[in-house]
Image (cartoon, rainbow, N blue to C red):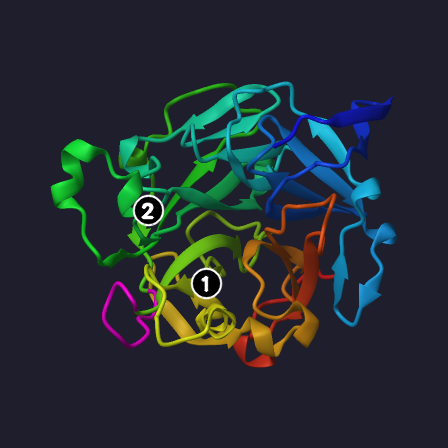
Amino acid sequence: MSRALVFVAALGGLMVVALADDIRFETSGVVRRGAELLFVSDEMPGTYLAYRIADLHWEENCARLTPERLAIIDLGQALSLDPEGVGILADGRVVLLSERLRGLVTSDGLVVDYDDPLGEMANAGLEGLAVRSFGGGRSEVAVLWEGGYLEGDRVPPVVQEYKSPKAVKPFIVIHEIERDAKPITQYKSRRTKATRVLDVPQPPGNPPSAQRFRAPDLVWEDPTERAQSGTENSNLIVLLNSRAAFRDPKLKPEDDARQSLLWLQRFSRDGARIGLPLDIDKKVPSAFGSLNWEGLGWWQEGKTLILVDDAGILRPATQPPAVCLVDIPPEWKISARGMK
């Protein structure tokens, strides 16, 4: 990210930026906190972005972020490299998912440190974070390793012979975080309550020119469940998008870009698919179709989801990042208990 930022205000730790001409960031995760949306950018370590919902100007069920309205909040933990997800723990703390560190970071530092299997490999790594709360300020988190095609040029030269043109499936790791947990390393992947591979659909065709899914983000179906963890209403909704490792030479570039599948799919906490997917492009205006959606959160729990794309160039810009709202289909029958 360019560092041509000018901080023009600082109130209660909230820093509002004026943007220079070459500012760039990519929105990854999103979560709603009352009257504002929180985002992370993998180009901005140790920080998250806040945007007032009242400042969104809707075009049907979608809106573009106005760069001048963004605020940067510094966690005071610059070690949070390559943040890909953002959530709010049951004790109220904002938590970032760091792909580079393979861990979870709050203003208190590194709260969760995962084992090697969750590290980044050939440009695939931790991308998604979902948080739900239990009594006593305990949180249950699910982190998502994205899967998809491994990029051959990112594989170390000494292991090039082991690379494969096949895509790998995403997987999730689920565990709890106690209230006010301080920097710890005890939540290792081998000790978690569940590590499960997601049974993602497999589009037809042969790799590496066929479409295969990766998973950028996820949410709990019921993020405010008050029962014990691992019980009822513990399914997940996962954002899926597909691509081919190599472009089909028979297609024009503009046609090939629309070969990607952009879906929302329900999974059990064991990784099994539940029902049919929801085609995102059929739920958003055509002007917002075929975007590279990277962030997923709840707008209204149990009813409406938030999607954010990873547009990065703000000035000069063709389009700043988009936010779209997608209603849950009635046939998914998700509990709307406690909704406002």
Residue 268, how many percent across, how many down? 39, 62
Q: Secondary structure at mark 1?
A: strand
Nearest to the observer: residue 60 or residue 162: 162
Q: Residue at x 34, y 54 (%)?
A: 170
Nearest to the observer: residue 308 or residue 328: 308
Question: What's the mark number on residue 241?
Answer: 1
Which of discs 2 and 1 lies nearer the camera? The answer is 1
Badge 2: residue crowd in 10 Å (few <14, some 14–19, many ≥20): some
Q: Secondary structure at mark 2?
A: strand
Q: State the quadrant of the C terminus.
A: bottom right
Rendered position, 63 above or below 93: below
Q: Which residue is mark 2?
A: 194
How far is the residue under mark 2 from the one under mark 1?
Answer: 24 Å
Residue 206 shown in magenta: yes
Three-letter code, disc 1: Asn
260 displayed left or right of 41 = left
| Predominant SS of the magenta segment | loop
Outermost residue, left direction?
Answer: 161
Q: State the quadrant of the N terminus.
A: top right
The magenta segment: 200-209
Residue 219, how many percent across, how many down? 53, 54
User: Does residue 142 appear in this view?
Assistant: no
| Residue 143, image quadrant | top left
User: Does residue 231 appear in this view?
Assistant: yes
Residue 136, how many percent across, how many down? 59, 35
